[in-house]
Amino acid sequence: MEPRIVRLSETSLIIYLGEEIDTDLIQTLTSLSQAISSKFRHGIVDVIPSYTSVFVEFHPLRVTYQQINHWLNETLSRLDSLEHMIKPQQISLPVYYHPDVAPDLESLAKERGLTVEEVIQIHSQIEYTVCAIGFAPGFAFLASVDERIAMPRHAEPKSKVAKGSVGIAGRQTAVYPLETPGGWQVIGNCPMSLFTPEQSPMMPFNVGDLVRFGPISRDEFIALGGQL
Amino acid sequence: MNVLKVLSAGILTLIQDLGRNRVAHLGLSTGGPLDIHAFCWANRLVGNHSNQPALEITMGAFSVEAYSDVVLSLTGANCSATIDGQRLESWRSFVLHKGQVLKLGYARQGFRAYLAIQGGFDIAPCFDSVATVVRNQMGGLLVRPGTSLKRDDWLAVNGDSAIPEPTYRPHFVVSRFIPNYDDEIEIGVIESYQANLFPDDAKKRFYASPYLVSDKLDRMGIRLSGEKIHCDSVGIISEGIALGSIQFPPNGQPIILTHDRQTLGGYPKLGCVSRMSLMRLAQARPGTKLNFYQAELDKESQAYFAFMRFFGL
């Protein structure tokens, strides 16, 4: 599709670059996000890349919508030449896949006609792309989960999903950085801290990064600080 | 220097500045005062710049004792404030002397009061802001990030709190800038986002029917009840959510998303409440009647940019 710029409010706009989730689009989103921030600097209040779009909140007394729009039109017409300024990081996360920490692991396997071992093997063999960060601080939406273990969210969200829970929702997977309510199918737990406001950076991910999950034993999980 | 001690913290009293920028891509909310108009006036009345930390007191029922003479200001909701039992008008600055108690009753008109102090409250920032965002466990007092003030909390003032002159003359907001917090408000809507997914007759019904502010309102969003509006989609690919977005979950009842909203969302959105209307909406109590109208982007922008210039935002 042709990129589309939509003015949302007095101080915000959104750029749509696609109509369907496509992990190949993510590098373009992050490059564009980076380029907007470096071009307009203090004129830009926030930039949120997500799946197929880039949301921009601007400071209207430092930069006008017309200025941003003009630059975007030029930039979007030569998107291919947009320099990929950020090299994606490759991140590896340990996961303890076991019913002790994963209330939905066995039911998901049963539902999809697989053994628990097969679910673990399928989930941990793919390199996922961070497509968006949101919902809660540090919550990274990862795509794409193999069709064979894709499962919709619970119809009723659970009031409490433990910190570190590794969940599946449709063809997405994610780690819950903090205990929150949530509806994803929990198949494991990652003992690493993914959101530490006192640290810089606060979280290991950026949109566009690549993530792999590595199965660990119960002992390793506990040694890494995991809570049963 | 500790100058105020909280005697009663009310239901929700949060330290706020204008909010946290350049963190939305990490999933953090901006925070900041819901009624930026009353907040900026509170700071202006005591000679502060607009980004100084001040208190947002939801529904009132708050009191503090002074441990030093301080210059304060109170704006926003009318909470029948008193100093040692003596009635105190809102929308003005005043001196609270050592040993005196400032007391706010329950909000009678409006929903949120703002209390500023000359020099600003001294709070350590987190990501360049002190704004308290409860759902992010961030901002406010360092000892208890992301929480409401509590009884016996101490509040310090920035720098050496200049002892007010005995002849201190209070500052007032002229009456034409003081809003009426009526129980019925007109709310301007800038159509955008998925507006084209809403059939014409659905939009017509939205603008023609009044909506009531429900009791499900917090700093994330304000849920309304009224005519159900459905559009040609139940969900969209998650995207960044602008301040004031009007989203329609499958039950057809609109939610207006405010400062502590999630950064991403996947419900269809008709557009955004204008910034000027949002300031007024921040004072709406449950049961307040809202009438929406289609606003012009240019006109709304001019009004808001003038507001920003006036307060140096």
Image (cartoon, rainbow, N blue to C red):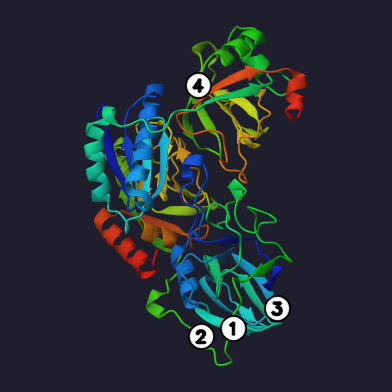
Three-letter residue code for mark 3 = Tyr
Q: Nearer the viewer, mark 2 or mark 3?
A: 3
- Image height check: is B132 above or below B170? above
Q: Residues within 10 Å of mark 3 (few under 14, many from 20)?
A: some
- Image height check: is A174 above or below B82? above
How far, Cα to Cα, is label 1 from label 2? 8 Å
Three-letter residue code for mark 4 = Tyr
How far, Cα to Cα, is label 1 from label 3? 12 Å
Inspect this view and state whether residue A187 appears.
no
Three-letter residue code for mark 1 = Val
Which residue is nearer to you in this view: B205 or A205? Answer: A205
- Image height check: is B199 above or below A185? below
Q: Are marks 4 and 1 on the same chain?
A: no
Q: Nearer the viewer, mark 4 or mark 2?
A: 4
* Residue B170 disc label: 2
Instruction: Determine the secondary structure under disc 3.
Output: loop
Q: Residue B69: horizontal and vertical position, in percent? A: 64, 82
Subunit bearing disc 3: B
The residue labelled by disc 1 is: B95
Subunit bearing disc 1: B
Q: Is residue A37 toward the left or the right of residue B223 in the image?
A: left
Q: Residue B212: horizontal and vertical position, in percent? A: 46, 54
Instruction: Determine the secondary structure under disc 2.
Output: loop
**Looking at the image, is mark 2 or mark 3 earlier in the sequence?**
3
Q: Residues within 10 Å of mark 4 (few under 14, many from 20)?
A: many
Instruction: Determine the secondary structure under disc 1.
Output: strand
The residue labelled by disc 3 is: B67
Q: Are marks 1 and 2 on the same chain?
A: yes
The residue labelled by disc 4 is: A128
